[in-house]
Amino acid sequence: MYKFLTKLDKLVDRVTIFFVVLTMAVLLVSSITGIVLRWTNTPLVWIEPFVRHLVFLLAFLGGIIAAGRNAHISIDILGRYFEAFHNKKIKMRFDRLIYFISFFAVVWLTDSAYGFYVVELQYGKEVFLGIHSGFLVGIIPVGFSLIAFRFFYKFVNSFSIFHDGEAI
């Protein structure tokens, strides 16, 4: 089970990086196209909402990568305190607790986002190019669920014999 989770986490990381690069390329081309078309007084109405949703998608993709690499925003006063006194076991347990709490917080956010998604499917409207707002809002629960998986994997990984490449 642990090897499967490790492979799945690496797959999520690779696919996310691929989509970050792809989204950035499409975002740049769309933004430049929108600017050029505005200069020529032939704007396409759908480009601006499309770019906004790409930025939204990019934010979630960045969150998925950050959660997997411990690069997310954190207030880690106690963790730094334990690290300063070279107490690896307490620091590891503290990190484990943070991963556990973060996992459940993001699962709660995922559940709320899914509820919003369902409501948006029922009462939303077409945003651009015939795309319903509910499908665009689907970015939120999918993004949060992948972030939750990354925290779950970090929690499970914290029980392994090796933690951050060092034996504990």
Image (tube, rainbow, N blue to C red):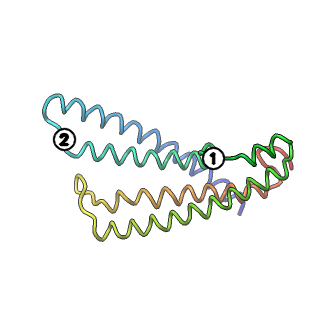
- Three-letter code for the amino acid on which mark 1 is drawn: Ser
88 vs 145, nearest the viewer: 88
The x, y position of residue 43, in whole percent, is 17, 37
How many labels, in total?
A: 2
Who comes first in sequence, dot 1 or dot 2?
2
- Judged left or right of residue 23, residue 15 is right
Q: Residue furthest left?
A: 41
- Three-letter code for the amino acid on which mark 2 is drawn: Leu
Q: Quadrant of residue 136?
A: bottom left
**Vertical position of residue 35 compared to residue 17: above or below:** above
74 vs 135, nearest the viewer: 74
Name the residue that disc number 1 marks. 74
- Judged left or right of residue 97, residue 108 is left
Q: Residue at x 79, y 44 (%)?
A: 81
Q: Residue at x 32, y 67 (%)?
A: 121
**Vertical position of residue 23 compared to residue 5: above or below:** above
Marks 1/2 in contact by CB < 8 Å: the verdict is: no
Instruction: Name the mark nearer the viewer: 1 or 2.
Output: 1
Counting other residues with Cα less than 10 Å from the Cα at mark 2, is it few (<14), some (14-19), or many (20 or more)? few
Q: CA distance from mark 1 to mark 2?
A: 41 Å
47 vs 98, nearest the viewer: 98
Q: Residue at x 51, y 58 (%)?
A: 144
Q: Quadrant of residue 125?
A: bottom left
Name the residue that disc number 2 marks. 44
